[in-house]
């Protein structure tokens, strides 16, 4: 077990210090686990959750078609016609980014809305830095709201065998969706204070035209079919993945028929984040390998030793440890590793795991908003600002990220305990 633990720790450290090569590091780590015989090839192929891989690939493809249709830009312009000044323009863009992010990947949401934030800020003569940061942190917050909102949600849904509907209502209680929305509402006063000086009047018009409505219907179709499938008892394991991939292939086929420039078609295929897919597949293998070696049980026992028999103490430790760790480590490998740990802890304490699962998801998702490098959405937003000639200082991000994260985490922490304890 010691060798497996050392390998696992080394893989994690390399992913932390080589963020641009996380997928390659994880793939090499998975191969090492195979060579050390902690997992067989058949076990490795079985350990990969192909349903998650297909879900992500299909959703990424449909989201790229949705972005190319320019529908997000048009909706944003419509929303901006309803606001009186720059302060509310920033807040509305943030809220909209959160709502979109509940059903679309966080990074894709930022890529859709950050250019709009830049354009609006330039028209108003204000710095786009706080606007884009607000869009990014709001996107990261609401990614945990639904089964398809974020990779971490997909991981939880698959591991806990949760349906799309379970994120809204589970075992007779409100699901994580309502907790996330409560946290989002609690952050509005934070934005009102932070952006209180932005009183410039805004005069927006709807200028973006949408000629292709198919991607919008495809995205809505994925959501509708996932909801319907959630009521299908004993459904095949790959059901959700097949749904997402089917809608993507329909969109790709239609675009291929009508597209004059085949480079656009290749652009859709290139937009799929193959590195994330490789990272996840490799992590599934690594986690199964360290489970076979007894590492997961050892980590669970360590948590139990510090948390004792107090459910409140254990819940608190998981939430705030996740916040701190996710501020510096990408939450995808962290959540993938911690799900079996949390399940083992809940079994050892003789309690249902959902309280701890939701605490883990809340802490890991929101913790990324503490620092500029804690979440991929933040990195994407800062990258867009840098390319546009607006460098972001750490204090620029922390000024928004810290109060936003504290309010959202504390709201979710209390709400989950009151509902699920």
Image (spheres, rainbow, N blue to C red):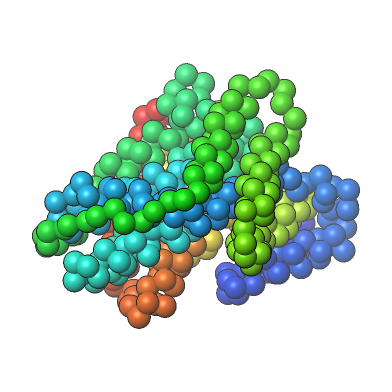
Q: Position of residue 105 (x, y in %)?
A: 51, 51
Residue 120 pos. (x, y %): 26, 63
* Residue drawn at (39%, 33%) of the image: 178
Residue at 50 percent across and 32 percent down: it is 167
Residue 223 seen in the current view = yes
- Say above or below: 394 vs 148: below
Q: Quadrant of the C terminus?
A: top left
Q: How many marks?
A: 0
324 or 57: nearer the viewer: 57
Residue depicted at x 60% and y 73%: 20
Q: Going 82% across and 51% down the picture, which residue do you hit?
A: 44
- The quadrant holding residue 256 is bottom right
- Relative to 291, 179 lies left or right: left
Work out whether 74 lies above or below 400.
above
Q: Picture coordinates of residue 200 (x, y %)?
A: 12, 62
Residue 342 appears in the picture as rendered: no
Query: Toward the viewer: 178 or 82?
Result: 82
In the figure, is residue 196 to the left or right of 278?
left
Residue closer to the observer: 52 or 37: 52
User: Residue 333: x and y, percent?
Assistant: 61, 56
On screen, residue 242 above or below 7: above
Q: Quadrant of the N terminus?
A: bottom right
């Amino acid at each position: 077990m010691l060798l497996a633990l050392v390998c696992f720790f080394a893989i994690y450290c390399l992913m932390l210090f080589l963020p641009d090569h996380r997928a390659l590091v994880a793939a090499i780590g998975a191969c090492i686990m195979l060579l050390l015989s902690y997992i067989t090839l058949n076990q490795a192929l079985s350990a990969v959750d192909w349903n998650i891989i297909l879900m992500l690939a299909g959703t990424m493809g449909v989201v790229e078609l949705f972005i190319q249709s320019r529908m997000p830009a048009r909706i944003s312009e419509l929303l901006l016609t309803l606001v009186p000044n720059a302060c509310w323009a920033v807040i509305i863009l943030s809220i909209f980014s959160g709502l979109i992010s509940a059903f679309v990947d966080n990074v894709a949401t930022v890529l859709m809305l950050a250019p709009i934030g830049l354009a609006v800020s330039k028209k108003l003569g204000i710095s786009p830095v706080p606007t884009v940061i607000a869009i990014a942190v709001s996107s990261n917050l609401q990614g945990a709201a639904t089964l398809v909102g974020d990779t971490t949600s997909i991981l939880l849904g698959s591991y806990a065998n949760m349906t799309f509907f379970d994120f809204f209502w589970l075992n007779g209680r409100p699901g994580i969706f309502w907790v996330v929305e409560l946290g989002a509402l609690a952050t509005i006063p934070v934005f009102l204070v932070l952006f209180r000086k932005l009183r410039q009047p805004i005069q927006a018009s709807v200028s973006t035209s949408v000629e292709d409505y198919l991607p919008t219907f495809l995205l809505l179709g994925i959501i509708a079919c996932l909801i319907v499938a959630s009521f299908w008892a004993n459904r095949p394991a790959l059901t959700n993945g097949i749904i997402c991939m089917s809608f993507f292939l329909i969109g790709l086929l239609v675009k291929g028929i009508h597209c004059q420039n085949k480079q656009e078609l290749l652009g859709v295929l290139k937009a799929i984040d193959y590195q994330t897919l490789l990272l996840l597949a490799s992590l599934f293998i690594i986690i199964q390998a360290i489970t076979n070696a007894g590492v997961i049980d050892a980590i669970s026992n360590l948590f139990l030793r510090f948390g004792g028999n107090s459910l409140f103490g254990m819940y608190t430790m998981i939430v705030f440890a996740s916040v701190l760790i996710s501020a510096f480590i990408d939450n995808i490998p962290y959540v993938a590793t911690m799900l079996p740990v949390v399940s083992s802890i809940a079994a050892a304490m003789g309690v249902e795991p959902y309280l701890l699962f939701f605490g883990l998801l809340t802490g890991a998702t929101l913790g990324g908003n503490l620092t500029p490098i804690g979440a991929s959405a933040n990195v994407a937003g800062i990258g867009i600002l840098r390319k546009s000639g607006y460098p972001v200082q750490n204090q620029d991000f922390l000024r928004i990220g810290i109060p936003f994260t504290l309010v959202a985490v504390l709201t979710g922490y209390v709400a989950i305990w009151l509902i699920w304890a």
